[in-house]
Amino acid sequence: MKTADQGDMQAVIDAARIGEAVPVGDTHLAFPLPDGGHVKVIDIESQIAPYRPNPARKTGTFHAHDAATFAAYLAKHGTPDTEVWADAVGAKIVGVIDAHGTDFLAGWGGHRVLYTVAHTKAWQAWIARDGQLMSQSEFAELIEDRALDIVRPSAADMLELSQTFQATIGVNFESSKMLSSGERVLEYRETVDAKAGRAGKLEIPKDFDLALIPFEGADGFKVNARFRYRITDGALRVGYRLTRPDDVLREAFESVVTALSGMDGTPDVIFRGTSS
């Protein structure tokens, strides 16, 4: 039985009193049961719905793959009461077509369009290794695969560094020194036939910069990454730590929302938060 207001309850009482079916609102019917002590309320709409040429109202959640589709759907189905909610935490934007209206007019909230903002492959590749220490070969492969994302030092310099990592696989790293520029110099010794061999140095930059688009359809951002390394028993492991990636994601999501707000069909006001 649906939740009854004062008028609905009176209709149920009337049905019990007069022993005949009584309408409850526009979609329900109350009628007395044969035992004379109970009244049942049925949803007429659900009973006749299969026989209607069209449903009584629009329902369902539809998933848009990009901002343009999201805005186009709003332009087609939107009403003056339609709301848009942007959830930065969940990286999604929800359009509630039949939202609550003004003057205490309630909306069903059952017709929605959802745009889940997707991460780019470049962002996924760098965030997956963030904070991890890798072998020299693993790190070299990452640099070679994602060289186009690197803007400082130049991609050519980073590729040269990756080749140096490959060339020094198997040597014995002994110590490290920090230069006044912040760069690290790792000293190693290459052994041949179990004898002490030639010494060498490997210079690692303090950090490097990436040019990344975190979300599909977002603006591009410069993301700083600080080098990390560890020498254990002569073996070198290398990695990086992205600088404040959560802040970058928030700004990138906001750029998507800003672009969406300028599209036809989108309400003037976009709420920040979630819609249940």
Image (spheres, helix red, strand yellow):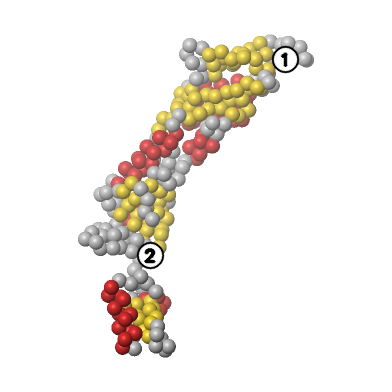
Amino acid at pointer 2: Thr
The x and y percentages for residue 253 are: 38, 41
Give the number of the disc on residue 261: none
Location of residue 62 by image quarter: bottom left
Amino acid at pointer 1: Thr
* Residue bearing the label numbered 2: 59
**Which residue is at a point 41% across and 59% down the rendered structure image?**
61
In the current view of this chain or complex, which residue is farthest to the right? 193
Image-based side of 26 in relation to 220, left or right: left
**Gap in angstroms between the C-alphas marked 2 and 1:** 72 Å
The x and y percentages for residue 109 are: 34, 61
Q: Up-down: is 81 above or below 154?
A: below
Image-based side of 257 in relation to 137, left or right: left
Asked whether 75 or 104 is in front, the reply is: 104
The quarter of the picture where the N terminus appears is bottom left
**Which residue is at a point 51% across and 29% down the rendered structure image?**
241
Q: How many marks?
A: 2
The quarter of the picture where the C terminus appears is bottom left
The reply to whether residue 66 is in sight is: no
Asked whether 210 or 43 is in front, the reply is: 43
Q: What kind of element bears circle 1? A: loop
Q: Up-down: is 43 above or below 274?
A: below
**Mark 1 Cα within 10 Å, few/some/many (few <14, many 20+)?**
some
Asked whether 26 or 125 is in front, the reply is: 26
The x and y percentages for residue 67 are: 37, 49
Q: Nearer the viewer, mark 2 or mark 1?
A: 2
Q: What kind of element bears circle 2? A: loop
Identify the mark nearer the N-term, 2 or 1.
Answer: 2
Give the number of the disc on residue 191: 1
In the current view of this chain or complex, which residue is farthest to the left? 103
**Which residue is at a point 59% across and 29% down the rendered structure image?**
133
